[in-house]
Amino acid sequence: MDNGSTVGDHNTTIMAGSLSVKRYFTFATGLVECLGFAGAVFGWASLVFVLKEDGYFSSLCVNSTGANATQILDCSRQDEQFSLIFTIASFMNNFMTMPNGFIFDRYGTTVARLVGIFLYTAGTLMVAFSSSAVPNLLFPALCFLAMGGILLLITNMQVGNLFGSHRSTIITLYNGAFDSSSALFLIIKLVHESGVSLRAAFLFLSACSVIHLLRTFFLLPRKFIPYPVPDHYTYGLTCGKSEALSSEESATDNAQTAVDETPLNKDATVTQVKTFRQCVLSRFFVLHLLWLSVMQLRHYLFIGTLNPMLQRLSGGEASLVSQYINAFAITQLCGVLCAPWNGLIMDRHKGKPRAAGETEQEADLRASVLSLFLTALQCVLFSLCASTPYLPLQYLTFILQVLNRSFLYGGNAAFINLAFPSCHFGKLYGMVMGLSAVFSLLQYPCFALVKGALHGDPLYVNVGLTVLSLLAFVHPLSVYLHCRRTSRNKAAAASS
């Protein structure tokens, strides 16, 4: 009997060890996937440099008369076309997150990832077969890259559920990797300067979709990763055990609804879970949408107008523009290093005793206030630097921009995860990204205003956006007042 018990314990230990290794491998490969592919579209400034060298939309450049009656080449219409491509792609990246979130919540991980991989591969192939003769292929191509990339991110964020108290840290880390993946286009720019064609580079990216497919079937669940994770929970296909795992996963899927609809407060009852409609109409959601939208608009306009801004500040010196574009793209790599700090801020209370009567969700909300406030403060500082027409200062602008972006998107996903029931995560994440995308369309009229009435000088637009960014402070203030009011109400109820 003892021998049988010992063997059983030994087998359990081996199983637990193999599951632990698989979880860490899932985490590591997901990090590489987000870092190398998901947010590539936000490296647009580097790709624009390559596209200009290859003559995309060059027919829009015209000769004009400059100062002292000198003849200059005016490429403002070419810049406007590139800005329009990025505006539409960034809009689709956010707006299509809404239906993508519904697909993820309704059909699960496998279906959502297959859709995402198809879109991403189609986008890379379109760029590969575009040319200066057919530059309009860039419009659908960048949209597909954006939509496919965000689906890769959404399906990877659930990996945080495998690591319990470090969930917010991992979610923010993945979002930081998503930001850092914008450096992919810098790599394409560098290899292009070494003689590798744009077509060859994007055909290679298309071939990498095989890796995404392997992760989909072997390292991710068919449906969802529950939170909290049940004992001996497993996922994905294993050679020789796929049928058994499918049966176990089916049982897990049946239990998923009950698990997902359990609030973060383990002492609460299922009847207390808000409906999707209640979540969308709540003050938290509305103010969180405002918080995200004003800062996101600032970032999108900065990225979309970076090339013409550097050309103006450098006097059109191509080598200097290239130097600053490279510096910007290199700083984007640091997003994956900056994002975990935000997660650590949000997870800093984990493992510590809570105040008397305080629930887990209330503790999470209280911890999120500092993160929300710091993100808004970073955006104001970044906007002030970006508004200053001094070229060397833009190095500091790049640093503040990547720091703020990593805090912004990681904090966005983490806040939705902790403030609302997890069964609505995909829908709410998609909704907030989709609605913020509508707001981000203001970047194009802002760009047109700079090019037209302001004669290329973005100072007044930058000042206006800096003032607008101050609205982001309303959200952390609201969450802080809510936490303080809840604490007072509980204290009054306890004393009575």
Image: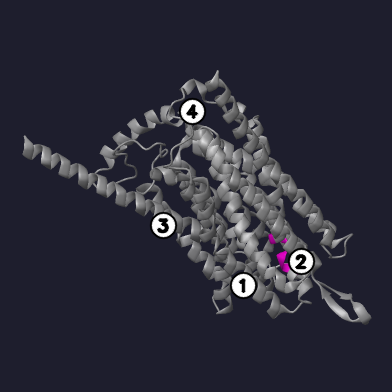
Identify residue for label 1: 326
Amino acid found under the numbered disc labelled 4: Gly
- Image spot of residue 240 (x, y percent): 23, 46
Where disc 1 sits, the SS reads: helix
Per the model, the C-alpha gap separating discs 4 and 2 is 61 Å
Tell me which residue sits at (66%, 46%) in the image: 292
Tell me which residue sits at (62%, 46%) in the image: 372
The C terminus, quarter of image: top right
Q: How many marks?
A: 4
Circle 2 packing at 10 Å, graded few (<14), some (14-19), many (20+), is some
Which numbered circle lies on residue 211? Answer: 3
* Numbered disc in front, either 1 or 3: 1
Where disc 4 sits, the SS reads: loop
Instruction: State yes or no: residue 307 in magenta.
Output: yes
The N terminus, quarter of image: top left
Q: Nearer the viewer, residue 176 or 304?
A: 176
Q: Is residue 92 above or below residue 313?
A: above
Q: Is residue 378 above or below residue 59?
A: above
Per the model, the C-alpha gap separating discs 4 and 3 is 47 Å
Tell me which residue sits at (63%, 37%) in the image: 479
Q: Is residue 17 left or right of residue 85?
A: left
Amino acid found under the numbered disc labelled 1: Asn
